[in-house]
Amino acid sequence: MAIRFVSSNIISSLGFTTYENMRNLLAGQVGIVSINNPEIYPTPFMASIVESNKLEEQFNLIGIQQESTRLEQMILVSVSEALSKTDIDITSPRTMIVLSTTKGNVDLLQATGSVSPERALLWKMAEFIGLHFGNLNPVRVVSNACISGVLAINTAAMMLNSSLCDHAVVIGADLVSRFVVSGFMSFLSLSTEPCKPFDRNRDGLSLGEASGTLILEKTTTPAAGDILFLGGATANDANHISGPSRTGEGSVVAIENALFEADKLPSDIDHINAHGTATRYNDDMESIAIQRTGLLSVPANSFKGSWGHTLGAAGIIETAALIESMKQNVVLPTAGLQTAGTTHPLAVSNKPVYKSLNTCLKLASGFGGCNAALILQKMT
């Protein structure tokens, strides 16, 4: 039995489909711009925002009657587009939905519109999404800081492997909101320019908003070209409420356990899509973890210089882009990188690198010492 990815969608500042986003990532495009919106923050800040007019246009095409928040609109459009490329019945009791988000409809705490404030509760928003698509199974919500997306994929894979379902629709979504921007501003962790992952002169992250969907299924007959989920793991080093481990301990454990589950060696890995937030300590921590697991020479990259840190959406949209990278055998550029500079020198580039990509590693790290990893394999 194998688990394969059958469809994806990415909605971000770089486009409303996986194809559009992939094209712009390959070209090194940056969707991070200066945002001047006093309703979110009193002074301008750098962020990656989904185009509102395009979102409204795409949402209206779905023909939904019930009032929806901006975040819910992004989710419904993303899932609908991903489903349109498959014949999967999302209403089936054998189809599960997994939702990754860190803050959900947090903006409803201050809103006075017609959407019920109850949908600020993650489970209520998840219930709304499930009912819209006619799926009566409980929607599983994964909310564990910035590893939520990777953890949601790992959770869906466990459900498929346990025969709880035949198909899993995994969604990731978060907004650039007043709550989120204020929080990161209080940490003094936001850059005053588009962020520069793994760069010697990096000075902080850029926030982004996005919604992404990955659809997985179990199969006994994987075909050439299919991208399979081989294994995943999570570990928490409990180092600090916001600071990553200086030894990369949790990430090391997650990588080693993911390799064990996938039955792979470090020498089998062709490419690493790292978390790469462009904060001083996270990027150094990842370089330490990558060095400790014998992966230092493996080509690595980060997408956050292109569309920012999209929180609960990050693991979903970054994995979707990684899957397309594997299909096209290209390591996508790390936007913003000029001069690499981490504790251990990573094999990163601001230009596309074309090479055979058969086995790849995806990393994620987050507040509270949480870390996650997953491994993908291309059928040949």
Image (tube, grey):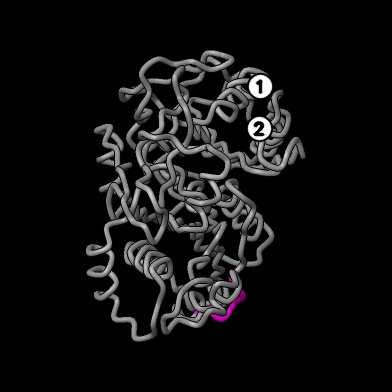
* Residue at the farthest front position: 42
The tag on residue 255 is 2
- Say which amino acid is labelled 1: Thr
At label 1, counting other C-alpha atoms closer than 10 Å, the crowd grade (few under 14, some 14-19, many 20 or more) is some
* Quarter of the C terminus within the rendering: top left
**Which region is colored magenta?**
135-139
Residue at 38 percent across and 64 percent down: it is 74
Q: Position of residue 123 (x, y in %)?
A: 61, 72
Labels 2 & 1 near each other (Cβ < 8 A): yes
Residue on which disc 1 sits: 293
Which image quarter: residue 301? Answer: top left
Indicate the secondary structure of the residue bearing disc 1. loop
Residue at 50 percent across and 17 percent down: it is 346
Relative to 34, residue 157 above or below: below
**The stretch drawn in magenta includes residue 249:** no
Count of picture labels: 2
The tag on residue 265 is none
Relative to 12, residue 139 above or below: below
Q: Position of residue 279 (x, y in %)?
A: 52, 31
- Say which amino acid is labelled 2: Ile
Alpha carbon distance from label 2 to label 1? 7 Å
